[in-house]
Amino acid sequence: MRAILKMIAMAAGFMIISNGQPAMASNTTYPSSMDLPAKFLAMKVSEFIKLSAKDFSTVTGKKLNLKERIAFSLLKKSMKKSLKSHPDQTVKDYLATADKKDNTMLIIILVVLAVVIIAVIVAASSFSINVGG
């Protein structure tokens, strides 16, 4: 039980040290304009979101691994949300504005979650159960 609590405390501490972002979030990024061929950059977002991961890998000539397929689907979902406010936006324009999005709310939620986890750990470590005594 204590080993589990120590692991949770270490994970929460790491989240706080890494500015509230989990370690996996720093490795999972949307493809940048450097990763996409020029024909994709000129494409409208409304056309790009219709592509499947298989179509994308066929055109680029590179098979996407699991992490890249997940990032591709997240990119398409984000583009779909952006499409409502900017219907004529190109992929290049989207990627230029996507880098400037503010993740402040996500960071605040993760920091609050880390503080709650630490509070639960402290409360659980001070609570003891006497069995058969």
Image (cartoon, rainbow, N blue to C red):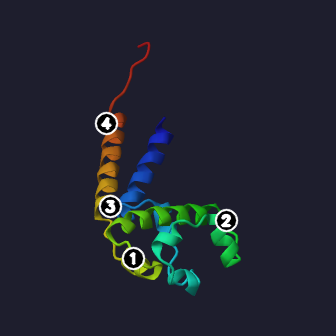
Label 4 or label 1, whichever comes before in sequence order: 1
x then y, percent, for residue 81: 38, 63
Q: Disc 3 versus disc 2: distance between alpha carbons? A: 33 Å
Please name the residue shown 43% across and 67% down the image: 79
Name the residue beneath numbered marker 2: 54
Identity, as a three-letter code, of the amino acid under mark 2: Lys
Q: Nearer the viewer, residue 117 or 91?
A: 91
The tag on residue 107 is 3
User: Would residue 82 appear left or right of 56 to someone viewing this image?
Assistant: left
Nearest to the eye among marks 4 and 2: give it: 2
Q: Judging from the image, what secondary structure is the residue with disc 1 in?
A: loop
Q: Nearer the viewer, residue 37 or 102?
A: 37
Name the residue beneath numbered marker 4: 123
Outermost residue to the top: 132
In the displayed structure, 15 sits above or below 1; it is: below
Q: Judging from the image, what secondary structure is the residue with disc 2 in?
A: helix
x then y, percent, for residue 28: 51, 66
Identity, as a three-letter code, of the amino acid under mark 1: Asp
Q: Say few, some or many: other residues with alpha carbon within 10 Å of mark 1 (under 14 / 14 to 19 / 20 or more).
A: few
Nearest to the eye among marks 1 and 3: give it: 1
In the displayed structure, 13 sits above or below 95; it is: above
Q: Say few, some or many: other residues with alpha carbon within 10 Å of mark 2 (under 14 / 14 to 19 / 20 or more).
A: few
Identity, as a three-letter code, of the amino acid under mark 4: Ala
Outermost residue to the bottom: 38
Nearest to the eye among marks 4 and 3: give it: 3
Q: Judging from the image, what secondary structure is the residue with disc 3 in?
A: helix
Q: Nearer the viewer, residue 97 or 124?
A: 97
Q: Say few, some or many: other residues with alpha carbon within 10 Å of mark 4 (under 14 / 14 to 19 / 20 or more).
A: few
User: Would residue 48 appear left or right of 115 to someone viewing this image?
Assistant: right
